[in-house]
Amino acid sequence: MAGIPVLSAISGALARLRSLWRGVRRRAQVEAEMREEFRHHIELRTEDLLRTGLSPAEARRRARIEFGSMATHRDAARAARGLRAFDQLRFSWLDVKLGLRMLVKHPGLTIVGCIALAIGIPVALAPLQLVHAINAPLPFDEGERIVGIEYWSGVDEVRPKLHDFERWRRELTSFEQLAAARPRSMNLVGEGGRVQVVRGAEMTASAFAVPRVKPLLGRVLLEADEARGATPVVVIGHALWRTYFGGDPGVVGRTLQLGRTRRTIVGVMPPGFLFPYRAEFWVPLQARAIDYEFGEGPSLWVFGRLRDGVSKKRAQAELTAVGRRIAADHPDERARLRTDLLPYAYAVTGLRANFQRAYPAYLMTLLLLGVACGNVGTLMLARAAARSTEIAVRNALGAGRGRIVMQFFIESLVLACLAAGVGLVLAELVARRFEFFTRSMPFWFDLGVGPFAVAVAGGLAVFSAVIAGLVPALRLTGKKVHHTLHHSGVGVAGLRFGAVATVLIIAETGLAVGCLSGVGMMGPGAFRAPSIGEGIAAAEYLTARLELPVDLPTRGAADSVAAGFSARFAEIQQELSRRLAAEPAVRAVAFASALPGMDHDRVRVEVEGVDAPADAPGGHTVRRAHVGPGFFSALEQPVLMGRGFDSRDLEASARPVIVNRSFVDQVLRGGSPIGRHIRCVHPPDEEPAPWHEIVGVVNDLGMNIVNPARGAGVYHLSAPGESRPVYLLVRLAGDPMAFVPRLRSILTRIDPAMQLDDPARLDEVFSDLRLEARFGSIVFMLVAAIAILLSAAGLYALMAFTVTGRTREIGIRVALGARRSNIAAVVARRALLQLGAGVALGAWLGAVVVRDMINDANLATYWPLALVTVAAVMAIIGLLACAPPTLRALRIQPVQALKQD
Amino acid sequence: MPDQAELLPGTLDLLILKAVSLGDVHGYGVLLRIEQITGGALEIQQGALYPALYRLEHRGLIASEWGRSENNRRAKFYRLTAAGRRRLGEEAAGWNRLVEAMSRALRATPQEI
């Protein structure tokens, strides 16, 4: 019999759950039934009363009175079913309406809260979206079985080579297909020398079996195509087929010139197929491991399709075993590497190492959102505090705690949803501005505002509302509610501005000061608009990057291939100069490793007779470019001192250099430059670099676009073919962009393989690059701005809260003859303490963290000044935030304060 | 009106279970049946009846079903479940033990001490 109580307990619990479920899910039906039952009861009672001889009207009346209030019974019945808690937590449109009304009624909080969350939510969303995109299965048949293989050194990805791939293909049994590919961009040479650069891939034939996509026309690549000497073939993408061949159904069998090779088209892939990354054409990978030493040859993307029923874990185990055997055979190259099975996206993006490094930054974004929410919560709490009397009264009238908490939660949810919406719109705008970034992502990545983004933003909005609304509401409705009612005259006296709020205000003030001093540390130049250089008519120049695809060197031939390649590059460059000079529209031509307005390479140099700066014993950090002899004259830049380069300088054993004006000012401290020698600082285990003589000085020509104030730089002379890739600079009469087709056709006639990338006007290159380069400081400033806004709002809330809560006390003090200064001190003391603590924290943050992050000793010169300025600014903003409530406190009259009761 | 006794706390549920155990009955019928079986000595507040019924239903001691009442209207009829029958037995036994103990106590004379 011992089982019976247990059984009955279980059946009782089940019955309760069933009834609860019914009460919650089918509320309307349950209530209708209840009403019907009550009505039936009253009718029967009325009939009984009629039989005792009462008049019908009287009988009905008596029956109703005896029964009592239906509403009360109904509530009691719901309570008996345990549904009260659910009733209170029930979502109600009334709360949404109240929430919207609060948004309008308190525009300050709405704006501040909305800005904070509208930035916080997308910032927290972006990394999640990227992670989602990477781990999402590829949009192919059983795409989740497609995986990548890569070596991992512990900090970096190491791309496999042909030897690794061929051995994996021989020994691994976990894969149905294993494939290798590498990205190629090539010149597509059309009729009459019309050229466009297209992105494609060199792949093994097996790579087409991995996604299992059938060609639209013709066939995919076959293993026979991979043989050396096979007929050169190409499979083209749908977009290329439509735009280039006008969708010709008979395109298979026609030919296409890619670079120097004319290839036969054997197939067309269906629309949207850009596998493996963003390819528009596919050519066979003809390289063989046998042609290379171990570890030599091209780097590959290796990926495959797991065999049916093989788990990733098992495949990884097999991979590890094969990896050990490879490491045993080639300890020098492979012993320190781990072979990893990865999501496919990692194998083709190289994002893994970035992810690992950026991981703390991602945590920071969530933390930032948390801080923003916490602060919005503080503001909500301050606003709610003013309503504590209302809450107490409602509570006394029967509104349960759950009901009130729910109302606050919905109010903050309304705000958070609004902010999430604004945030998504912002994110979309930013994504459009940085479209070049999205276009360089793998083809199946969806980083726009889609269902996933909306769902996650919604989740983050709820997360924000929980922090910003639920926590303050729980505190407000705690056990002190009745107490508040007793003291309704003093309003919020029963409630205290919590320690959490204090910590938040201090943290934000600190963050603002820290970030701003980080920006300020870059020096006054960080706020000066950088320029390309005085007197350069940037809109008249066409720029483009020239690149020649490298032939794959085979075993033992690496040196001769490299030498031949340089010679070929130089030939093309010289021929191009000659032909351009003959064009009537061309006014000047020059080549350089970097152009004014691009962020130039950094290099450390030492100067003969000038000591290294005390804070940078490794030498002076300056910017560097390699330019052809005609560079300065093409830009119409005068040589300010000394002489320009001339072509005889190319023959000198140590070629001379030219420095810019900032170099003279900052490195030589105004000393005479001409005739002095400088050299690059090499690591101690390398041979020292040769000395170069400074022969001239030119103006600053936009070498450092982040901070032009530190644009000290040096120009080396370089001969054609020495810098690769190289930037071409052409000055034109008329619209530079109109010359691009002509330039392409000239170049194609010289060598169809030579690629012309990113043609643009010089001023446009500059504005795009500047935006990119300044991204870091923009983020810093943005974070600082949010932090300032939030801390000012927080201080304001604290002060307003204090004044409201202490109105009576202040009134009494005034009545007793307190001086205005005393009152201001009483009110503002806490806010000022927090402000002070925040500024101190920010100074520390700036000193230790930000300085470390920027890690450039030259930067530190401006730092104390920046910090003091920022701290002062922050203090002023804080005081301004404190001012209105303090003034309100000073205006409080004793009578007014006492009338509050 | 005959003399009416106060309803002891906790006894309403027992009374309802007993009333329902005598045959399926609707809400008003429960009221009438209790009056009947107590000989009118106990009057149930109409307001207390329904919360008690719902509580018992919530616990799975009684179950309800819609049917036709004597005046041919739709009415909700309650019946005892197996768990309810078990509970009625336990509670009745407990009540009898209490009553026996109480009456023995009240019959006590000084000689018995």
Image: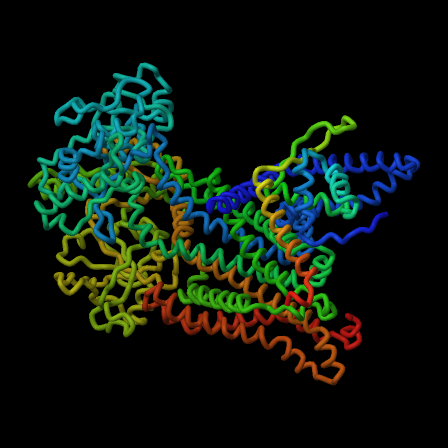
The reply, left or right, for residue A473 in relation to residue A730 is right
Q: In the depicted view, which residue is nearer to us: A590 or B67?
A: B67
Which residue is painted at 31% across and 21% down in the image?
A215
Position of residue A705 measured from the top left corner of the image (x, y, whole percent): 38, 56
Quick check: can you spot residue A427?
Answer: no
Quick one: quadrant of the C terminus of chain A?
Answer: bottom right
Vertical arrangement, residue B75 with respect to residue A838, above or below: above
Position of residue A269 measured from the top left corner of the image (x, y, whole percent): 32, 24
Vertical arrangement, residue A756 with respect to residue A512, above or below: above
Position of residue A781 measured from the top left corner of the image (x, y, whole percent): 47, 59
Position of residue A580 measured from the top left corner of the image (x, y, whole percent): 29, 38
Residue that sits furthest to the left in the current view: A556
Which residue is painted at 57% across and 50% down in the image?
A416
Which residue is painted at 18% across and 44% down in the image?
A320
Residue that sits furthest to the bottom in the current view: A817
Q: In the depicted view, which residue is nearer to us: A162 or B91?
A: B91
Q: In the depicted view, which residue is nearer to us: A202 or A66?
A: A66
The reply, left or right, for residue B60 in relation to residue A345 is right
